[in-house]
Amino acid sequence: MTTRWETADVLKSPMEICWQFAYEIDSQKLKTLYSKAKKYQWDAETDLDWSYRVDPSRPIMEDDVIGGVMRVPLMGRLSGSQREQLMAHLSAHRLSQFLHGEQGALMTAAALTHAVPDYQGKLYAATQTMDEARHVEVYARYIQKLAIVYPMSTTLKEIIDRTLTANHWVKIAIGMNMVVEGLALASFHNMLQVTPCELLRKILQGVLRDESRHVAFGSLYVGDALTAMHPDDREDIADFAFEVVSLMRRARRRDAPPDPGFLSVLDHCNIDRSEFFASVAELSASGQRFEAPRDQIHPFKHLMMPALVRVGAVTERARARYKAEGIPVWEDRRTLEQFEDDRAFA
Ligand SMILES: [Fe+2]
Ligand SMILES: [Fe+2]
């Protein structure tokens, strides 16, 4: 086997690695998560029907879940086949983010296995590592049916890189299990509501069930660690959480610079970039706003912010920073708690 260094990207981590010689389990909840994780391992190779043919004329996603690009006036002037092609590329672009994000999750889970100070935490993190490996496998295989893999979005890469190279395992658990997985859980859920692709539905159901454990771990494990920390260290963690959340928020603003991957979607579909952005400006000037359908999960409002508040990663000082940045500190945990119950995805 040859390592393909030309497509590799190497980072250095300041993380401390921790042995633990007390092989005791004192958290029943963590033990339950670990037991469930062992029991619910599914196998993408044998449990899914890969002979399923993805119909290129039927979009696997609806415009609603990929940001409403089709509402831009220019899209009304495209031919039917151009619209089809654009939807197919937008879908491939979105699925590519899932794929790359899962690789990030695989590495952060492995890092947690090294770094968490408790035996039970290590066992759990090892199961998450295996879950994420299966997720990378399943998305890598599905994406072959879409013919193209787009590069990772620069913001997602930056957030996961910061998480991977953080100096404390709590930052890793926050960056991945709360922030990135909050985004992923919302995207997977919203896509599951609308995709007509049977194979993708099965994949999303399996992945969502695993992810519900990952989000539950974040709150279970990080809360206790934060409570036990010196206040200065807690502020340092809260700053990290604020920085990754605000990076993600900024990238979603209308005036954010477009992601290079999205620009190459336009290029692949022969849509002129400047014409496209002129048309976006036309839509904004008309005062129309894109409203997501009501049953969609909002990653910040329903998952990320309530999870951060619950574990104590939003300190008073951090609240002021969120306010100054215009990010509401949503605290309603009802949706988050529903998502942590894997029976919802059985
Ligand atoms: Fe995953
Ligand atoms: Fe995950």
Image (tube, rainbow, N blue to C red):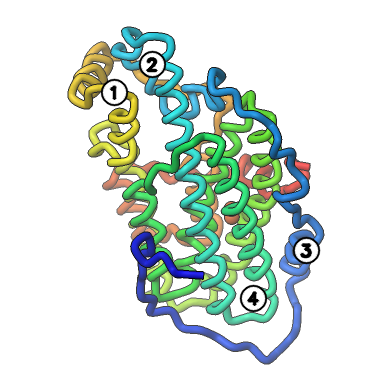
The answer to which of marks 2 and 1 sits earlier in the sequence is: 2
- Mark 2 in CB contact with mark 1 (< 8 angstroms): yes
Whole-number angstrom distance, CA of label 1 to CA of label 3? 47 Å
What amino acid is labelled 3 in the image? Answer: Lys
Whole-number angstrom distance, CA of label 3 to CA of label 2? 45 Å
- When the figure is inspected, residue 81 is found, relative to residue 51, above or below; the finding is above
At 74% from the left and 38% from the top, the residue drawn is 49
SS at badge 1: loop
At 59% from the left and 74% from the top, the residue drawn is 113
> Which residue is the site of mark 2?
82
* Label 4 Cα crowd, 10 Å radius (few <14 / some 14-19 / many 20+): many
- When the figure is inspected, residue 290 is found, relative to residue 13, above or below; the finding is above
> Which residue is the site of mark 1?
270
The answer to which of marks 3 and 2 sits earlier in the sequence is: 3
Location of residue 104 in the rendering, given as x and y in whole percent from the top left corner: 48, 59
SS at badge 4: helix
Using the rendered image of the protein, determine whether residue 309 is visible from the camera's viewpoint: no
What amino acid is labelled 4 in the image? Answer: Lys
> Which residue is the site of mark 3?
38
